[in-house]
Amino acid sequence: MKKSEIRILLVDDEPDILEIVSYNLSAEGYEVYTAKNGVEAISKAKKKNPHLIILDVMMPEMDGIEACEILRNTKGQENVLITFLTARGEDYSQVAGFDAGADDYITKPIKPKVLVSKVKALLRRLKSEDEVSEDITKVGSIVINREEYKIVNKGEEIILPRKEFELLALLASKPSKVFTREVILDEVWGNEVVVGGRTIDVHIRKLREKIGDDHFKTVKGVGYKFVL
């Protein structure tokens, strides 16, 4: 995910903090929004769907702890990254923050460059989650785990030889899309060995036997597609 695609919501009742922190985060390329209290933060979060929320604890109308608890129980905001940025460094305040569902706790004062580094570290969690999701594809009742080379169909684990697995993963990556024989050969076999179209047919036949005949459709003269 590009920095320009990452949305950060900064919540603090001190105008100077909002200005300085938002300036430094914007300079890094992030899309930054601001709010002055917990009530405004919840409203902005619903509208902007931020990837990260930086919350002050002590604020008027609604403090950061209460805002964090509400966000964690708001549909669409349950998994947003939340860190507190506050001058309160007491243990009980940190415990309350984590109990409310915070992912991290940053104590003021903090140098802008250090804050940016902490933000980058937090956002790396997003990348890890994205990478995991890219390794796992769910199509109907079938789960394809690319990292473990494992297929689960209707709760039953199926072991496939490598080429059968890669062929299934390719076709299932875009259900209903017709993959030509040329594309299949290039994506699955590449330059490893010279094979003919008959090789694809054999692998498709084996997949039909193991996964289900109704999932694979032959498009005569073109190739194959995966159907749900």
Image (cartoon, rainbow, N blue to C red):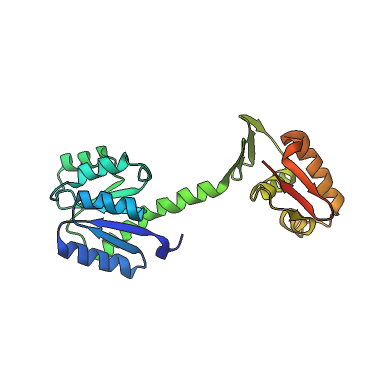
Vertical placement of 50 versus 164: above or below? below
Who is closer to the viewer here, 82 or 190?
82
Residue 34 coordinates in the image, percent (x, y): 25, 60
Task: Name the residue located 69 percent from the left edge and 43 percent from the top edge.
Answer: 227
> Left or right: 41 with respect to 51?
left
> Left or right: 26 with respect to 177?
left
Vertical placement of 73 versus 85: above or below? above
- Residue located farthest toward the bottom when viewing the structure as drawn: 27
Q: Quadrant of residue 10?
A: bottom left
Who is closer to the viewer here, 116 or 43?
43
Q: Quadrant of the C terminus?
A: top right
Residue 177 coordinates in the image, percent (x, y): 69, 52
Numbered disc total: 0
> Left or right: 66 with respect to 163?
left
Task: Name the residue located 36 percent from the left edge and 64 percent from the top edge.
Answer: 30
Q: Quadrant of residue 33?
A: bottom left
Task: Name the residue located 45 percent from the left edge and 53 percent from the top edge.
Answer: 127
Vertical placement of 204 versus 6: above or below? above
Residue 65 coordinates in the image, percent (x, y): 21, 43
Residue 226 coordinates in the image, percent (x, y): 70, 45
